[in-house]
Amino acid sequence: MSNPHAFPEPDRTAVYRAIESRRDVRRGYLPEPLPEELLQRLLAAAHSAPSVGLMQPTRFLVIRSPEMRRAVHHLFQQANAEAAATYEGEQHELYTGLKLEGLLEAPQHLCMLSDTGSERGHRLGRHTVPETAVYSTVCSVQNLWLAARAEGVGVGWVSILSQERLREVLHIPAHLTPVAYLCLGYVESFADMPDLERAGWEKRVPLESVVYLDRFTNDKTT
Amino acid sequence: MSNPHAFPEPDRTAVYRAIESRRDVRRGYLPEPLPEELLQRLLAAAHSAPSVGLMQPTRFLVIRSPEMRRAVHHLFQQANAEAAATYEGEQHELYTGLKLEGLLEAPQHLCMLSDTGSERGHRLGRHTVPETAVYSTVCSVQNLWLAARAEGVGVGWVSILSQERLREVLHIPAHLTPVAYLCLGYVESFADMPDLERAGWEKRVPLESVVYLDRFTNDKTT
Protein backbone atom coordinates (compact mmCIF):
# COMPACT_ATOMS: atom_id res chain seq x y z
CA MET A 1 0.00 0.00 0.00
CA SER A 2 1.30 3.45 -0.86
CA ASN A 3 1.09 5.40 2.39
CA PRO A 4 0.98 9.20 2.11
CA HIS A 5 1.72 9.57 5.86
CA ALA A 6 4.99 7.61 5.86
CA PHE A 7 8.19 9.66 6.09
CA PRO A 8 10.48 9.60 3.03
CA GLU A 9 12.92 6.68 3.21
CA PRO A 10 16.00 8.63 4.45
CA ASP A 11 13.90 10.08 7.29
CA ARG A 12 12.53 6.67 8.29
CA THR A 13 16.10 5.39 8.32
CA ALA A 14 17.15 8.27 10.58
CA VAL A 15 14.45 7.41 13.12
CA TYR A 16 15.44 3.73 13.15
CA ARG A 17 19.10 4.74 13.45
CA ALA A 18 18.33 6.75 16.60
CA ILE A 19 16.42 3.78 18.03
CA GLU A 20 19.09 1.20 17.21
CA SER A 21 22.20 3.18 18.11
CA ARG A 22 20.84 4.63 21.39
CA ARG A 23 22.90 3.41 24.33
CA ASP A 24 22.82 3.68 28.10
CA VAL A 25 26.04 5.66 28.54
CA ARG A 26 27.97 5.18 31.78
CA ARG A 27 31.49 6.22 30.75
CA GLY A 28 33.32 8.76 28.64
CA TYR A 29 31.30 11.87 29.51
CA LEU A 30 33.11 15.06 28.44
CA PRO A 31 33.39 18.03 30.83
CA GLU A 32 31.88 20.68 28.52
CA PRO A 33 28.28 21.44 29.61
CA LEU A 34 25.49 21.20 27.08
CA PRO A 35 24.53 24.56 25.58
CA GLU A 36 21.22 25.87 26.91
CA GLU A 37 19.47 25.76 23.48
CA LEU A 38 20.42 22.10 23.02
CA LEU A 39 19.21 21.21 26.52
CA GLN A 40 15.93 23.01 25.81
CA ARG A 41 15.45 21.03 22.58
CA LEU A 42 15.88 17.78 24.52
CA LEU A 43 13.44 18.89 27.22
CA ALA A 44 10.92 19.96 24.57
CA ALA A 45 11.18 16.50 22.98
CA ALA A 46 10.47 14.93 26.38
CA HIS A 47 7.63 17.35 27.05
CA SER A 48 5.87 16.40 23.79
CA ALA A 49 5.55 12.75 24.83
CA PRO A 50 2.08 11.22 25.11
CA SER A 51 0.43 11.60 28.50
CA VAL A 52 -2.69 9.96 29.85
CA GLY A 53 -5.65 12.33 29.54
CA LEU A 54 -3.19 15.02 28.37
CA MET A 55 -2.27 15.46 32.03
CA GLN A 56 1.43 16.17 31.28
CA PRO A 57 2.54 15.04 34.73
CA THR A 58 6.30 15.24 34.08
CA ARG A 59 8.48 17.73 35.92
CA PHE A 60 12.14 18.24 35.01
CA LEU A 61 14.84 19.06 37.54
CA VAL A 62 18.11 19.94 35.82
CA ILE A 63 21.06 19.55 38.17
CA ARG A 64 24.26 21.39 37.36
CA SER A 65 25.50 22.17 40.87
CA PRO A 66 28.67 20.16 41.62
CA GLU A 67 27.63 19.78 45.28
CA MET A 68 24.32 18.19 44.38
CA ARG A 69 25.92 15.93 41.79
CA ARG A 70 28.38 14.74 44.42
CA ALA A 71 25.55 14.17 46.89
CA VAL A 72 23.70 11.99 44.38
CA HIS A 73 26.90 10.10 43.61
CA HIS A 74 27.16 9.36 47.31
CA LEU A 75 23.62 7.90 47.22
CA PHE A 76 24.67 5.74 44.29
CA GLN A 77 27.64 4.41 46.23
CA GLN A 78 25.38 3.39 49.13
CA ALA A 79 22.83 1.67 46.88
CA ASN A 80 25.55 0.00 44.86
CA ALA A 81 27.26 -1.42 47.93
CA GLU A 82 23.92 -2.84 49.09
CA ALA A 83 23.32 -4.37 45.66
CA ALA A 84 26.85 -5.79 45.44
CA ALA A 85 26.31 -7.58 48.76
CA THR A 86 23.51 -9.65 47.18
CA TYR A 87 25.87 -11.36 44.73
CA GLU A 88 28.38 -14.08 45.47
CA GLY A 89 31.52 -15.57 43.96
CA GLU A 90 32.18 -14.90 40.30
CA GLN A 91 29.00 -12.89 39.90
CA HIS A 92 30.06 -10.61 42.76
CA GLU A 93 33.40 -10.07 41.09
CA LEU A 94 31.73 -9.35 37.75
CA TYR A 95 29.25 -6.96 39.38
CA THR A 96 31.85 -4.93 41.25
CA GLY A 97 33.84 -4.59 38.03
CA LEU A 98 30.92 -3.01 36.14
CA LYS A 99 30.84 0.74 35.57
CA LEU A 100 27.19 1.61 36.20
CA GLU A 101 27.09 5.41 36.16
CA GLY A 102 28.87 8.59 35.13
CA LEU A 103 27.47 10.86 37.84
CA LEU A 104 30.69 12.72 38.61
CA GLU A 105 31.83 13.05 35.00
CA ALA A 106 28.54 14.16 33.41
CA PRO A 107 28.30 17.95 33.79
CA GLN A 108 24.52 17.85 34.12
CA HIS A 109 21.99 15.46 35.56
CA LEU A 110 18.27 15.39 34.91
CA CYS A 111 15.76 14.08 37.40
CA MET A 112 12.36 13.38 35.84
CA LEU A 113 9.43 13.31 38.24
CA SER A 114 5.73 12.68 37.95
CA ASP A 115 2.96 14.69 39.53
CA THR A 116 0.79 11.59 39.76
CA GLY A 117 -2.06 13.18 41.72
CA SER A 118 -2.49 16.18 39.43
CA GLU A 119 -6.05 17.05 38.47
CA ARG A 120 -4.86 18.10 35.02
CA GLY A 121 -6.53 15.84 32.46
CA HIS A 122 -9.42 15.43 34.92
CA ARG A 123 -8.34 11.83 35.65
CA LEU A 124 -9.27 10.74 32.12
CA GLY A 125 -7.75 7.33 31.40
CA ARG A 126 -6.54 6.94 34.98
CA HIS A 127 -9.68 5.58 36.62
CA THR A 128 -8.72 1.95 36.20
CA VAL A 129 -4.92 2.09 36.05
CA PRO A 130 -3.48 5.04 38.03
CA GLU A 131 0.07 3.92 37.13
CA THR A 132 -0.48 5.44 33.69
CA ALA A 133 0.60 8.82 35.12
CA VAL A 134 4.06 7.42 35.85
CA TYR A 135 4.05 5.61 32.49
CA SER A 136 3.56 9.01 30.81
CA THR A 137 6.76 10.22 32.43
CA VAL A 138 8.65 7.14 31.22
CA CYS A 139 7.47 7.89 27.65
CA SER A 140 9.05 11.33 28.12
CA VAL A 141 12.33 9.71 29.15
CA GLN A 142 12.45 7.68 25.96
CA ASN A 143 11.63 10.68 23.76
CA LEU A 144 14.50 12.56 25.35
CA TRP A 145 16.84 9.59 24.98
CA LEU A 146 16.22 9.33 21.22
CA ALA A 147 16.47 13.08 20.61
CA ALA A 148 19.73 13.05 22.57
CA ARG A 149 21.13 10.24 20.41
CA ALA A 150 20.34 12.25 17.26
CA GLU A 151 22.15 15.23 18.83
CA GLY A 152 25.14 13.05 19.71
CA VAL A 153 24.42 13.46 23.43
CA GLY A 154 24.83 10.55 25.85
CA VAL A 155 22.16 9.60 28.38
CA GLY A 156 22.59 7.13 31.25
CA TRP A 157 19.70 6.07 33.50
CA VAL A 158 20.92 5.47 37.07
CA SER A 159 18.16 3.16 38.16
CA ILE A 160 19.29 1.89 41.54
CA LEU A 161 19.00 5.11 43.56
CA SER A 162 16.64 4.90 46.50
CA GLN A 163 13.63 7.11 45.82
CA GLU A 164 13.37 8.05 49.47
CA ARG A 165 16.99 9.13 49.80
CA LEU A 166 16.79 10.99 46.49
CA ARG A 167 13.74 12.78 47.81
CA GLU A 168 15.73 14.08 50.80
CA VAL A 169 18.86 15.09 48.91
CA LEU A 170 16.96 16.91 46.16
CA HIS A 171 14.25 18.35 48.45
CA ILE A 172 11.56 16.80 46.26
CA PRO A 173 8.04 17.91 47.27
CA ALA A 174 5.77 15.15 48.56
CA HIS A 175 3.38 15.29 45.59
CA LEU A 176 6.11 14.41 43.05
CA THR A 177 7.34 10.85 42.39
CA PRO A 178 10.93 10.50 41.18
CA VAL A 179 10.81 8.28 38.08
CA ALA A 180 14.18 8.58 36.35
CA TYR A 181 17.58 9.94 37.28
CA LEU A 182 19.69 10.57 34.19
CA CYS A 183 23.27 11.56 33.42
CA LEU A 184 23.44 13.79 30.37
CA GLY A 185 26.34 15.08 28.33
CA TYR A 186 28.64 15.00 25.37
CA VAL A 187 30.51 11.71 25.19
CA GLU A 188 33.69 10.24 23.75
CA SER A 189 31.77 7.57 21.87
CA PHE A 190 28.63 5.46 21.58
CA ALA A 191 29.35 1.76 22.01
CA ASP A 192 28.30 -0.79 19.38
CA MET A 193 26.64 -3.04 21.94
CA PRO A 194 25.19 -2.51 25.42
CA ASP A 195 27.84 -2.28 28.15
CA LEU A 196 26.29 -5.14 30.12
CA GLU A 197 26.47 -7.43 27.10
CA ARG A 198 30.07 -6.47 26.37
CA ALA A 199 31.00 -7.13 30.00
CA GLY A 200 29.42 -10.60 29.86
CA TRP A 201 26.67 -9.82 32.38
CA GLU A 202 23.72 -10.73 30.12
CA LYS A 203 22.98 -11.46 26.46
CA ARG A 204 20.17 -9.99 24.37
CA VAL A 205 17.37 -12.36 23.36
CA PRO A 206 16.12 -12.58 19.76
CA LEU A 207 12.86 -10.82 18.92
CA GLU A 208 11.05 -14.00 17.89
CA SER A 209 11.39 -15.38 21.40
CA VAL A 210 9.18 -12.62 22.86
CA VAL A 211 6.40 -12.28 20.24
CA TYR A 212 3.07 -14.15 20.37
CA LEU A 213 0.10 -14.13 18.00
CA ASP A 214 -3.44 -14.12 19.42
CA ARG A 215 -2.56 -16.41 22.31
CA PHE A 216 0.28 -17.26 24.63
CA THR A 217 2.27 -20.41 24.25
CA ASN A 218 5.05 -21.54 26.55
CA ASP A 219 7.63 -18.95 27.51
CA LYS A 220 10.25 -19.04 24.77
CA THR A 221 12.97 -17.07 26.56
CA THR A 222 13.97 -19.68 29.09
CA MET B 1 31.37 22.42 19.99
CA SER B 2 31.61 20.35 16.84
CA ASN B 3 30.18 16.96 17.77
CA PRO B 4 31.24 14.00 15.63
CA HIS B 5 28.42 11.83 17.11
CA ALA B 6 25.52 14.12 16.16
CA PHE B 7 23.41 13.01 13.21
CA PRO B 8 23.54 15.20 10.08
CA GLU B 9 20.98 18.01 10.23
CA PRO B 10 18.27 16.39 8.00
CA ASP B 11 18.42 13.22 10.15
CA ARG B 12 18.12 15.17 13.40
CA THR B 13 15.13 16.96 11.91
CA ALA B 14 13.53 13.62 11.00
CA VAL B 15 13.85 12.37 14.59
CA TYR B 16 12.30 15.57 15.97
CA ARG B 17 9.55 15.37 13.35
CA ALA B 18 8.61 11.85 14.54
CA ILE B 19 8.57 13.09 18.15
CA GLU B 20 6.49 16.20 17.43
CA SER B 21 4.00 14.75 14.94
CA ARG B 22 3.30 11.51 16.88
CA ARG B 23 -0.33 11.36 17.95
CA ASP B 24 -2.51 9.08 20.02
CA VAL B 25 -4.82 7.92 17.21
CA ARG B 26 -8.39 6.97 18.15
CA ARG B 27 -10.22 7.42 14.81
CA GLY B 28 -9.76 6.88 11.09
CA TYR B 29 -8.09 3.44 11.16
CA LEU B 30 -8.14 1.81 7.71
CA PRO B 31 -9.18 -1.85 7.30
CA GLU B 32 -6.06 -3.07 5.48
CA PRO B 33 -3.84 -5.04 7.91
CA LEU B 34 -0.21 -4.06 8.33
CA PRO B 35 2.16 -6.19 6.25
CA GLU B 36 4.12 -8.67 8.33
CA GLU B 37 7.54 -7.10 7.51
CA LEU B 38 6.33 -3.68 8.64
CA LEU B 39 4.91 -5.10 11.87
CA GLN B 40 8.21 -6.87 12.51
CA ARG B 41 10.14 -3.61 12.02
CA LEU B 42 7.93 -1.94 14.63
CA LEU B 43 8.35 -4.80 17.08
CA ALA B 44 12.12 -4.78 16.53
CA ALA B 45 12.17 -1.06 17.33
CA ALA B 46 10.28 -1.76 20.57
CA HIS B 47 12.55 -4.69 21.40
CA SER B 48 15.68 -2.54 21.13
CA ALA B 49 14.51 -0.19 23.89
CA PRO B 50 16.64 0.16 27.02
CA SER B 51 15.89 -2.33 29.78
CA VAL B 52 17.07 -2.39 33.36
CA GLY B 53 20.02 -4.77 33.75
CA LEU B 54 19.43 -5.79 30.11
CA MET B 55 16.56 -7.95 31.39
CA GLN B 56 14.38 -7.33 28.30
CA PRO B 57 11.17 -8.05 30.20
CA THR B 58 8.77 -7.06 27.39
CA ARG B 59 6.51 -9.64 25.75
CA PHE B 60 4.40 -8.77 22.69
CA LEU B 61 0.97 -10.24 22.05
CA VAL B 62 -0.27 -9.32 18.57
CA ILE B 63 -4.04 -9.66 18.30
CA ARG B 64 -5.57 -10.04 14.86
CA SER B 65 -8.51 -12.33 15.70
CA PRO B 66 -11.80 -10.41 15.27
CA GLU B 67 -13.36 -12.30 18.20
CA MET B 68 -10.61 -11.21 20.57
CA ARG B 69 -10.71 -7.64 19.31
CA ARG B 70 -14.46 -7.56 19.97
CA ALA B 71 -13.96 -9.03 23.44
CA VAL B 72 -11.46 -6.29 24.31
CA HIS B 73 -13.81 -3.67 22.92
CA HIS B 74 -16.44 -5.00 25.28
CA LEU B 75 -14.01 -4.51 28.19
CA PHE B 76 -13.47 -0.95 27.04
CA GLN B 77 -17.20 -0.28 27.04
CA GLN B 78 -17.48 -1.49 30.63
CA ALA B 79 -14.53 0.59 31.85
CA ASN B 80 -15.70 3.61 29.91
CA ALA B 81 -19.19 3.47 31.39
CA GLU B 82 -17.66 3.30 34.88
CA ALA B 83 -15.41 6.26 34.11
CA ALA B 84 -18.28 8.30 32.57
CA ALA B 85 -20.30 7.85 35.76
CA THR B 86 -17.64 9.79 37.71
CA TYR B 87 -18.28 13.01 35.78
CA GLU B 88 -21.24 15.35 36.13
CA GLY B 89 -23.00 18.04 34.12
CA GLU B 90 -21.09 19.62 31.26
CA GLN B 91 -18.00 17.53 31.91
CA HIS B 92 -20.08 14.35 31.66
CA GLU B 93 -21.46 15.52 28.34
CA LEU B 94 -18.00 16.38 27.07
CA TYR B 95 -16.61 13.02 28.25
CA THR B 96 -19.29 10.90 26.62
CA GLY B 97 -18.76 12.79 23.35
CA LEU B 98 -15.03 11.91 23.23
CA LYS B 99 -13.82 9.14 20.94
CA LEU B 100 -11.25 7.32 23.07
CA GLU B 101 -10.35 4.23 21.06
CA GLY B 102 -10.42 2.57 17.65
CA LEU B 103 -10.53 -1.05 18.85
CA LEU B 104 -13.06 -2.31 16.30
CA GLU B 105 -11.63 -0.38 13.34
CA ALA B 106 -7.93 -1.11 13.86
CA PRO B 107 -7.17 -4.46 12.19
CA GLN B 108 -4.53 -5.35 14.76
CA HIS B 109 -3.98 -4.71 18.43
CA LEU B 110 -0.79 -5.09 20.41
CA CYS B 111 -0.69 -5.92 24.09
CA MET B 112 2.69 -5.22 25.66
CA LEU B 113 3.41 -7.08 28.87
CA SER B 114 6.26 -7.18 31.34
CA ASP B 115 7.83 -10.26 32.87
CA THR B 116 8.66 -8.33 36.02
CA GLY B 117 9.97 -11.28 38.03
CA SER B 118 12.33 -12.58 35.38
CA GLU B 119 15.80 -13.51 36.54
CA ARG B 120 17.26 -12.25 33.27
CA GLY B 121 19.63 -9.39 34.06
CA HIS B 122 20.20 -10.99 37.47
CA ARG B 123 18.15 -8.22 39.15
CA LEU B 124 20.82 -5.63 38.31
CA GLY B 125 19.37 -2.13 38.78
CA ARG B 126 16.18 -3.49 40.31
CA HIS B 127 17.27 -3.95 43.91
CA THR B 128 16.02 -0.56 45.05
CA VAL B 129 13.26 0.21 42.53
CA PRO B 130 11.57 -2.96 41.20
CA GLU B 131 9.20 -0.82 39.09
CA THR B 132 12.07 -0.31 36.65
CA ALA B 133 11.07 -3.60 34.97
CA VAL B 134 7.71 -2.12 34.01
CA TYR B 135 9.41 1.17 33.08
CA SER B 136 11.54 -0.80 30.58
CA THR B 137 8.37 -1.98 28.87
CA VAL B 138 7.03 1.58 28.67
CA CYS B 139 10.29 2.64 26.97
CA SER B 140 9.51 -0.08 24.39
CA VAL B 141 6.06 1.38 23.82
CA GLN B 142 7.50 4.80 23.03
CA ASN B 143 10.12 3.36 20.64
CA LEU B 144 7.35 1.58 18.76
CA TRP B 145 5.19 4.69 18.73
CA LEU B 146 7.91 6.81 17.11
CA ALA B 147 8.90 4.14 14.57
CA ALA B 148 5.21 3.79 13.68
CA ARG B 149 4.89 7.54 13.11
CA ALA B 150 7.84 7.44 10.70
CA GLU B 151 6.15 4.55 8.88
CA GLY B 152 2.86 6.47 8.72
CA VAL B 153 1.20 3.98 11.07
CA GLY B 154 -1.20 5.13 13.78
CA VAL B 155 -0.94 3.98 17.39
CA GLY B 156 -3.56 4.52 20.09
CA TRP B 157 -2.99 3.57 23.73
CA VAL B 158 -6.23 2.38 25.35
CA SER B 159 -5.30 3.08 28.93
CA ILE B 160 -8.53 2.53 30.86
CA LEU B 161 -8.86 -1.24 30.45
CA SER B 162 -8.91 -3.16 33.71
CA GLN B 163 -5.73 -5.23 33.98
CA GLU B 164 -7.59 -8.03 35.73
CA ARG B 165 -10.33 -8.33 33.10
CA LEU B 166 -7.75 -8.09 30.32
CA ARG B 167 -5.87 -10.91 32.00
CA GLU B 168 -8.93 -13.15 31.78
CA VAL B 169 -9.93 -12.29 28.22
CA LEU B 170 -6.40 -12.68 26.82
CA HIS B 171 -5.46 -15.66 29.03
CA ILE B 172 -2.40 -13.80 30.27
CA PRO B 173 -0.12 -15.99 32.41
CA ALA B 174 0.22 -14.92 36.04
CA HIS B 175 3.89 -13.95 35.74
CA LEU B 176 3.20 -11.28 33.08
CA THR B 177 1.93 -7.77 33.87
CA PRO B 178 -0.13 -6.05 31.15
CA VAL B 179 1.41 -2.61 30.66
CA ALA B 180 -0.02 -1.20 27.42
CA TYR B 181 -2.89 -2.10 25.13
CA LEU B 182 -2.45 -0.49 21.71
CA CYS B 183 -4.48 -0.12 18.53
CA LEU B 184 -2.25 -0.25 15.47
CA GLY B 185 -2.93 0.42 11.80
CA TYR B 186 -2.86 2.57 8.74
CA VAL B 187 -4.87 5.73 9.26
CA GLU B 188 -6.69 8.39 7.27
CA SER B 189 -4.66 11.18 8.82
CA PHE B 190 -2.54 12.38 11.74
CA ALA B 191 -4.13 15.32 13.54
CA ASP B 192 -2.26 18.59 14.05
CA MET B 193 -3.04 18.69 17.75
CA PRO B 194 -3.97 16.08 20.37
CA ASP B 195 -7.63 14.98 20.16
CA LEU B 196 -8.26 15.91 23.80
CA GLU B 197 -7.00 19.45 23.18
CA ARG B 198 -9.11 19.84 20.03
CA ALA B 199 -12.18 18.60 21.91
CA GLY B 200 -11.62 21.17 24.67
CA TRP B 201 -10.92 18.58 27.39
CA GLU B 202 -7.49 19.91 28.40
CA LYS B 203 -4.82 22.35 27.15
CA ARG B 204 -1.11 21.67 26.89
CA VAL B 205 1.14 23.55 29.32
CA PRO B 206 4.26 25.42 28.16
CA LEU B 207 7.63 23.75 28.74
CA GLU B 208 8.97 26.51 30.98
CA SER B 209 6.25 25.79 33.53
CA VAL B 210 7.61 22.30 34.23
CA VAL B 211 11.40 22.85 34.27
CA TYR B 212 13.44 23.59 37.40
CA LEU B 213 17.16 24.24 37.87
CA ASP B 214 18.97 22.72 40.86
CA ARG B 215 16.04 23.19 43.22
CA PHE B 216 12.27 23.23 43.26
CA THR B 217 10.34 26.43 43.53
CA ASN B 218 6.56 26.71 43.71
CA ASP B 219 4.54 24.63 41.26
CA LYS B 220 4.25 26.73 38.12
CA THR B 221 1.49 24.73 36.38
CA THR B 222 -1.39 25.71 38.62
Image: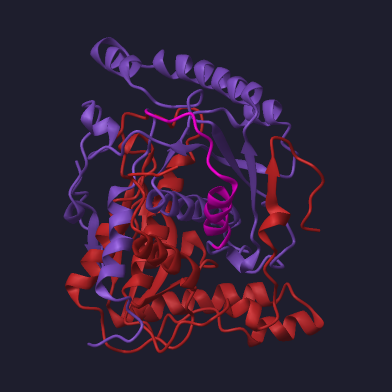
Chain colours: A red, B purple
- Which residues make up the magenta segment? B28-48
Residue A119, percent from left and from top: 30, 33
The answer to whether B199 appears left or right of B105 in the picture is left
- In which quadrant of the rendered view does residue B17 lie? bottom left
Q: Exactly how many numbered labels are in the figure? A: 0
- In which quadrant of the rendered view does residue A203 lie? bottom right
Q: Depth check: B101 or A133 in front? A: B101
Residue B78, percent from left and from top: 53, 16
Q: Depth check: A174 or B87 in front? A: B87
- State the residue at coordinates (48%, 25%): B105
Residue B153, percent from left and from top: 42, 44
The answer to whether B200 appears left or right of A103 in the picture is left
Q: Spot the residue most to the top.
A: B89
| Quadrant occupied by the N terminus of chain A | top left
Residue B126, percent from left and from top: 62, 63
| Quadrant occupied by the C terminus of chain A | bottom right
